[in-house]
Amino acid sequence: MNGRGEIASELRKIFADHLTATYVAKVREVRALSSQAALVRAGVGIVPPGKAALNPAGNAIQSVLVVAETGGIKVDLLQNTRATFQGQFPMSLAHGRSVHVYSVA
C-alpha cells in the first residue's frame, strides 16, 4: 500500500467485514528529531474479540516517524517488528503487563 487514500481504502475493507482485536500500546520513547519531526517507539499487542488477555502472537515493537505539517501531524513511516521473545517468558510477560488500552477510532 502506498499513500493515504490506498491505505484508508484497504483498512476500511478489513474493519467493515469482521470483528477486530482491541489494540493496546505502551509508548516507550518519544525522541524529537527536529522541531517538525519525532520518533515514537512503543510496545504493542492485541486482545482478541471476546477475550480479556493479550494474544502473545500479536506482540510487536513499533517505531513511528511523525511529522508536523499544516493542518496537523501525519505518520511518515511505521515500522512494525514482531516481538516473539524467543522463549524468554519473563520478558514476554513484562511486555504484556506494560501495555495499556488506547481507544482507536
Image: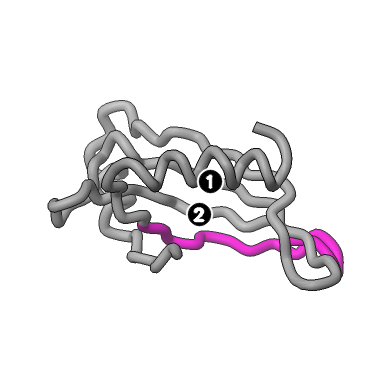
Q: Gap in Å between the C-alphas at discs 1 and 2? A: 5 Å
Mark 2 Cα shell of 10 Å, populated few (<14), some (14-19), many (≥20): some
Q: Which mark is residue 62?
A: 1
Q: Is residue 33 above or below residue 46?
A: below
Mark sitting on residue 20: none
Q: Quadrant of the N terminus?
A: top right
Does the magenta portion include 4? no
Examine the residues drawn in magenta and state their main secondary structure.
strand
- At 33% from the left and 39% from the top, the residue drawn is 58
User: Disc 2 marks which residue?
Assistant: 42
Residue at (23% x, 42% y) in the render: 55
User: In the rendered image of this protein, does residue 3 appear above or below residue 64?
Assistant: above
Please tell me which residue lies in front, 71 or 60.
71
Residue 18: percent from the left, percent from the top? 29, 42
At 63% from the left edge and 64% from the top edge, which residue is drawn? 30
First reached walking from the N terminus: tag 1 or tag 2: 2
**In this picture, which residue range is highlighted in magenta?**
24-38
The answer to whether the residue labelled 1 contacts the one labelled 2, judged by CB atoms less than 8 Å apart, is: yes
Tell me the quarter of the image containing the C terminus: bottom left
Residue 31 within the segment the image draws in magenta: yes
* Residue 72 appears left or right of 8: right
Tag 1 secondary structure: strand
